Image (spheres, rainbow, N blue to C red):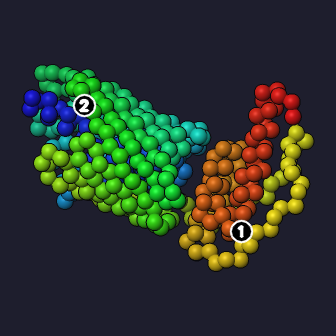
Amino acid sequence: MNVIIQMILFSYPFGLFGVGPACGSDAGMMLEKGVFALEYNPSGLAWVDSIEAGVAAEGLFAYNLVGFSYNYRGWPAAVSVHHNTQTTGFSIGAGNLRLPLALGAAFGASFESANSESNYSLRAGLQWREYVGLALGPRLWLAPDTAHLSGMIQIGASVPVVEGLKFLAGASAEVAPVAFRAGGGLAYDPFLFLRVESVVATDGWGAGVVLKSENDRGGVWVNKGFSGEPWRFGISYIRDVQSPKVKEVVVFRNLPQRVDTVYISKTTPVVKDTSKVVSPDVRRRQEQLMAKANRYYAEERYEEALAVWKEVVQLDPGSDLGVRASEDIKDVTALIETLNKIRTGKPQ
């Protein structure tokens, strides 16, 4: 029995380090985006659009993790290294964004110095926007006189309830030995810079706080099991490193003349009042997102551009940039529909 317990603990060496899933719910793990998605659902790497670096620790630095990710021509790749007093290991993986899906795969390995044991895992995952995530794969545990093969699957979902509030639900299962875990909780964003998460699962409960700014995300979490386990806590921090040149250049896309097969309504648009004061942080974020959407549009990555314009509208639909983004969404949606008709040979 002790061998089985030790095997379970060693076969899952990763901590609850994602900035998004600070409370450690399966839902949060499966929907984590950025460099630490490598430790959970590798499809979350697909959302990295520049360079990200992250560090994390559990307890008083009893377990440490360092990660780095880089987007090379639309293929974000990442590597991480973890270490504690007994084990050292690494993970490597990559993702690709094909909206509305994000796809990814990762390989992980851990080595225990005292008993010459090792663990290897493969994980494949997908995410559907920010709503559903799934990861699965085999794991191999090796010891000097034995070997063990198992498999796991995890799924998580985030359901919007009201503005800023989401319901989290998730579950995980493992074979050989059989294990199951399920839980649910809430994630609330009262401000642009703050998120609070909580979850109750079959084996314990957790809570976390995430602080975020333009290029930084930091998380603090606590976790407590129902079977008398001690309290666990940890911290994590991610820095989104972008080149200054990208930050300084903000270009607002003016739609060029469409081809003859594209039909856009010529009705006079309703003029909206955009004179209200917009927070400098919101304005700056909208400008960055507009520049990002323009780059996607120029590369003919229309679905990705639409997703970014929707973020602009969500931040402040009444601002001049929010109105501009709404118009761009309408026009590019018409363009996509027309292109689809051309590809399928349907009449215009």
Residue at the location (15% across, 38% down)?
113
User: Dot 1, crowdedness within 10 Å: few (<14), some or many (≥20)?
Assistant: some
Residue at the location (76% across, 69% down)?
272
- Give the answer, above or below, for where 339 lies relative to 290: above
Q: Position of residue 232 (x, y in %)?
A: 20, 54
Q: Position of residue 74 (x, y in %)?
A: 58, 43
- Give the answer, above or below, for where 157 lies relative to 309: above
The residue under label 1 is 320
- Specify the quadrant of the image occupied by residue 107: top left
User: Dot 2, crowdedness within 10 Å: few (<14), some or many (≥20)?
Assistant: few
- Give the answer, above or below, for where 223 lies relative to 172: below
> Which is more toward the observer, 227 or 85?
227
Element type where label 2 sits in the image: strand
> Which is more toward the observer, 108 or 128?
128
Residue at the location (69% across, 55% down)?
294
Q: Is residue 173 left or right of residue 268?
A: left
Which quarter of the rendered picture does the C terminus lie within?
top right
- Give the answer, above or below, for where 293 lies relative to 98: below
Q: Amino acid at mark 2?
A: Ala
- Specify the quadrant of the image occupied by residue 320: bottom right
Please give the label number shown on residue 179. 2
